[in-house]
Amino acid sequence: MDVTIGVQARDGAIRAVIDDDKLDAFKKQLEEALASEKTTMLWVTDKEGREFGVPSDKIAFIEFGNEKASRQVGFSAAS
């Protein structure tokens, strides 16, 4: 699953691909980080083993979805 994390005061966003079988655990970790009154780090490990740390108080948005399906652009010839 493609995950995009918007971070306040940063140009662009963090993009990662998370295994579908680890998605529920990631969502639970995200909810706990956002519910905490203290700033915590949300650690994301993507399918390639890269790790990202985002302070919970700097998360602007999270987007889940298939990037390929949502960004199709172009023309096709009808036959």
Image: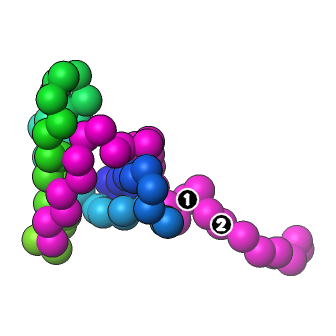
Residue shown at the point (55%, 59%) measured from the top left = 69
Rendered view: 68 above or below 31: below
Rendered view: 61 above or below 15: above
Q: Amino acid at mark 1?
A: Ala
Residue 21 seen anywhere in this rendered image of the structure? no
Q: Amino acid at mark 2?
A: Gln
SS at badge 1: helix
Which numbered circle lies on residue 69?
Answer: 1
In this orientation, which residue lies closer to the viewer: 76 or 37?
37
Q: Is residue 20 left or right of residue 11?
A: left
Residue shown at the point (43%, 42%) measured from the top left = 60
SS at badge 2: loop
Q: Is residue 33 left or right of residue 59?
A: left
Residues marked 1 and 2 touching at CB (< 8 Å): yes
The range drawn in magenta is 50-79
Quadrant where the C terminus lies? bottom right
Residue 5 seen anywhere in this rendered image of the structure? yes
